[in-house]
Image (cartoon, rainbow, N blue to C red):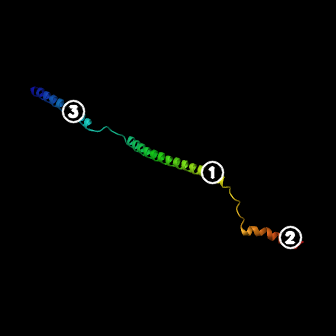
Amino acid sequence: MATAKKAAPKAAANTKAKTTAKTAKPAVKVALKKAPVSKSAKAIAKISANIAKLTERKDKIGAEIKALRDQRAALKVAAAPAAVAAPVAPKAKPAAKAAAPAKKAVKRAAKK
């Protein structure tokens, strides 16, 4: 029995040493690892970045459209006084259309 008593304390001492070593290692490993980031969180971050880029492009294009509209409005205002000052002359009729009434008159005269 004496040998059994001596073996038990050694085994107990070994298990205590092992448990303290085991508990110390995971704590160190956890401190060294980065915070876990899920795949969905990474995907959401990527999509958010793309949305930000597209929104910036959309705003830039919108500003260009607004500038072009303002430019067009300024051109219309400048063209309006010139149109009022010079009235539009009636368009001259083409020769073929002018000749049509003459042909009708000739046909009427022939019938009489």
Residue 24 on image: x %, y %: 21, 32
Residue at mark 1: 81
- The crowd level at tag 1 (other Cα within 10 Å; few <14, some 14-19, many 20+) is few
> Marks 1 and 3, Cα distance to the nearest angstrom?
88 Å
Amino acid tagged 3: Ala
Badge 2 amino acid: Arg
Q: Residue 2 in the image: x percent, y percent? A: 9, 26
Residue 53: horizontal and vertical position, in percent? 43, 46
Label 3 sits on a secondary structure element that is: helix
- Pointer 2: what residue? 108
Q: Which part of the image, by quadrant, shows the N terminus?
A: top left
Judged left or right of residue 109, residue 98 is left
Report which quarter residue 18 is drawn in. Answer: top left
Give the number of the mark in front: 1 or 2. Answer: 1
Mark 1 and mark 2: Cα distance apart in space: 48 Å
**Quarter of the image where one finds residue 33:** top left
Label 1 element class: helix
Residue 88, located in which quarter of the rendered image?
bottom right
Between label 1 and label 3, give the one nearer the viewer.
Answer: 1
Distance from label 2 to label 3 (Cα)? 120 Å
The residue located at (77%, 69%) in the rendering is 100
Question: Which one is earlier in the sequence, the residue at label 1 or at label 3?
Answer: 3
Q: Secondary structure at mark 2?
A: helix
Residue bearing mark 3: 24
Q: Nearer the viewer, residue 102 or 12?
A: 102
Say which label, 2 or 3, has the lower sequence index. Answer: 3
